[in-house]
Amino acid sequence: MKVRILGSAAGGGCPQWNCACAVCAAARREGRQRTQDTVAVSGDGSAWYLINASPDIRTQLVSAPDLAPGPGLRQTPIRGVLLTTAELDHTVGLLSLREATALTVYATAAVRIALEPVRQMLAAYTPVDFQSFGTGLAGGLTVQRLTVGTKRPRYAAGLPGGDWVSALRLTDARTGSSFVYATCLPAWTEEFDEFLRGADEVLLDGTFGTDDELTRATGRPGSAASMGHLPIEASRHRRARHPGTRFRYGHLNNTNPAVGPDIATDGLVLPL
């Protein structure tokens, strides 16, 4: 299995276009940037699936050699998109995939209901199939899903359903290696702990370093918990239960200055 981090930032990226916080200011000075959270995964190096589709998806795809089109004129290795939320920073990029000859999107019932207007727009450009999560994917991958949160996007207030936020476990059926994606994780429950048991690599929620980070950095109200995110300071000690698993953090908010070997970066290929 191959896993490529296409984008490692939360919504807005870093630097965020309208933010002058210390982290964004430093990123501008130093010419650094993170694009928004998206991952590509493949079981055989030929059939690839995107985990979410950020607003930066075009830039991310053309920067990844493994995802280049060919040999046919409009042939692409991308076989589908796996959505873990209906949030705009995970779904707006679907509209940029309208040039595809066909598009398959996997999502929960709640997410599919929220994105029905997007499905209709896409259907005017290409055949699009919104499906529930199955188990088998092309290239020898299997996928398991766990509902980890019920927080709706703001635009979906009032819509039905409880399976709004998912963690995914991708497993290579040939080698048994597995990768867990959980970049929107409101709480580390016993159910989640069991879900990741034995995984080789886990990409965790790194949105905020501390619960009060946003307020300290910008003066705006709102804790990490109120926004549906477990801060890094609250998850690091939980990792000790899984000594054989490599953990990294993704989906970093523009206010999060975290750096280090367990912090994901754009373009990183995980050693599975």
Image: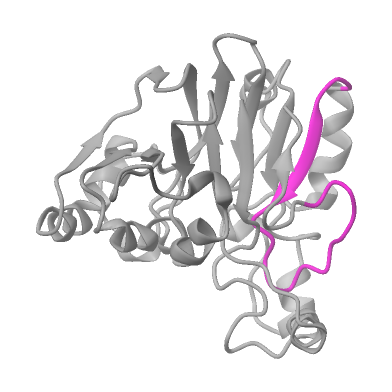
Residue at x 46% of width, y 36% of height = 48
x, y percent for residue 162: 37, 39
Q: Quadrant of the C terminus?
A: top right
| Left or right, residue 56 beside residue 4 | left
Residue 140 visible in the shown view: yes
x, y percent for residue 125: 14, 58
User: Eyeballing the image, is 60 above or below 171?
Assistant: below
Residue at x 60% of width, y 37% of height = 181
Residue at x 44% of width, y 64% of height = 58
- Residues shaded magenta: 243-263
| Left or right, residue 154 beside residue 206 | left
Locate residue 174: give its quadrant: top right
| Left or right, residue 48 beside residue 246 | left
User: Eyeballing the image, is 230 above or below 63?
Assistant: above
Of 31 and 86, which appears nearest the observer?
Answer: 31
Residue 186 visible in the shown view: no
